[in-house]
Image: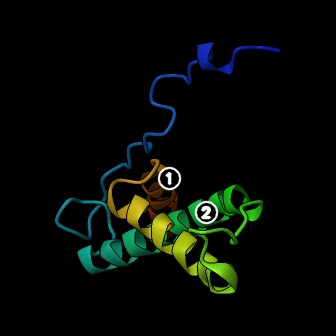
Amino acid sequence: MSDLAAVAAPAGFLTPAPVAPTAGSADGTGVSDARKAQIRKTAQDFEASFLSEMLKPMFEGLSTDGPFGGGEAEGTWRSFMIDAMAKQTVKAGGVGLTNVVMSEMLKMQEARQ
């Protein structure tokens, strides 16, 4: 079995590609600041949804019975807890997916103009 910890990602693997400046906004990207805020929110929501789907398998096999288990209610509300954990992870900085998605969305917006 190989040691995956020894494999390093290339430098800049999860950093967004630079966007060429154009006219249209304060920073010259051609996309308004309000639109950028909306794109960032959408990218953060996407990252939270992605993380939620990645976290779900971790909790599938956990038993909800026992002295400290939540019983049937824990199983019922578990998806809400996972979604909250994913949103909190994104709020704390996430795993770097937001910036990559946002960069690609900005490129698509600029191409449309």
Residue 28 image offset from top left, x and y in percent: 24, 60
Amino acid found under the numbered disc labelled 2: Phe
Residue 9 image offset from top left, x and y in percent: 56, 24
Q: Is residue 6 above or below residue 70?
A: above
Residue 112, can we see it? no
Residue located at (70% from left, 71% from top): 65
Residue located at (45% from left, 48% from top): 96
Looking at the image, which residue sits at the far left?
A: 26
Q: Quadrant of residue 71?
A: bottom right
Looking at the image, which residue sits at the far right?
A: 1
Q: Which residue is mark 1?
A: 97
Q: Is residue 36 above or below residue 80?
A: above
User: Depth check: 65 or 26 in front?
Assistant: 65
Residue located at (47% from left, 48% from top): 95
Q: Residues within 10 Å of mark 2 (few under 14, many from 20)?
A: some
Q: Is residue 111 above or below residue 12?
A: below
Label at residue 5: none
Label at residue 50: 2
Residue located at (57% from left, 60% from top): 51
Residue 51, can we see it? yes
User: Depth check: 99 or 76 in front?
Assistant: 76
* Left or right side of 51 for 39: left
**Mark 2 vs 1, N-terminal side:** 2
Amino acid found under the numbered disc labelled 1: Leu
* Left or right side of 105 for 92: left
* Quadrant of the rendering where the N terminus is positioned: top right
Where disc 2 sits, the SS reads helix
Label 2, label 1: how many angstroms apart (C-alpha)?
A: 9 Å
Count numbered badges in the picture. 2
Looking at the image, which residue sits at the far front?
A: 67
Callout 2–callout 1 Cβ contact below 8 Å: yes
